[in-house]
Amino acid sequence: MTYNFDFNIEKDGSPYLTSDKAAKYISDILYTRVSSDKPLLESRVAEELASTSETTLSEDERVYILNILLSLGIDNYAKGKLVHPLVQDVVDGVPVRVTRWQLRAQLAIQNLEANVTAAINALPDSTQAEQEFKIKAKYAWESANNVQRQSPTVFMIQQVLGLTDTQVDNIFIEAYKIDI
């Protein structure tokens, strides 16, 4: 299964770990483990995370990487955020993430894709923070591999479009079912 670590670890809206992305943080940790039990696996995962923020792991590999992350000398909040992609794909019946193409296909089926594009284009950009958020949202909409259900961008679009949590959950549930 492919796991995506293309997210910042934040607390109360501020950066919480020193790395920009969880993927870089994990990659840096794995690169330092040259005398580990499985240096080839760790090197492969480190390289994948450094270049794409994603890694594909078998079940045994997932457990191995999960154990490394759980043994880190960081607090439980950071660990929980860091390992989240490895521990859950679906929470309470709602996918944690779907691929961008699945989400866009489902939005097109529901005639909402153009509305989302318009909502992203209409995001405020009067402050530096708003400009940066809008840029990130546009790039994510155009290029991201996966879309996290609980991402700030999804929440912002939900608010702009006036969708309920249940409606967005159902979009993700239906998108997750799409397979070609």
Image (cartoon, rainbow, N blue to C red):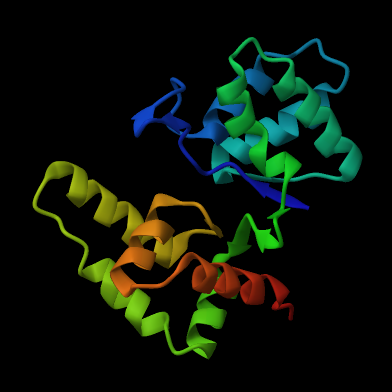
Residue under the image location 34 percent in, 59 percent down:
156
Report the side of 60 relative to 31 (left or right). Answer: right
Question: Which quadrant would the C terminus be assigned to in this image?
Answer: bottom right
Q: Depth check: 75 or 49 in front?
A: 75
Instruction: Residue 75 in the image: state x and y as whole percent.
Output: 59, 15
Q: Is residue 96 above or below residue 67?
A: below
Q: Residue at x 36, y 75 (%)?
A: 116
Task: Tell me: residue 73, above or below residue 54.
Answer: above
Q: Residue at x 28, y 72 (%)?
A: 119
Instruction: Return the residue nearer the eye: 108 or 152.
Output: 152
Q: Is residue 140 above or below residue 64?
A: below
Residue 124 place in picture, x, y as percent: 16, 59
Q: Quadrant of residue 175?
A: bottom right
**77 lies above or below 55:** above
Q: At which x and y percent is residue 31? A: 65, 20
In the image, taking residue 59 as reference, residue 84 lies left or right, namely left
In the image as oriented, which residue stretches furthest toward the left?
A: 126
Where is residue 128, by image quadrant?
top left
How many marks do you count on the picture? 0
Residue at x 76%, y 27% (from the top left corner): 42
**122 relative to 180 in the view: left or right:** left
Q: Position of residue 66 (x, y in %)?
A: 77, 30
Q: Quadrant of residue 35?
A: top right
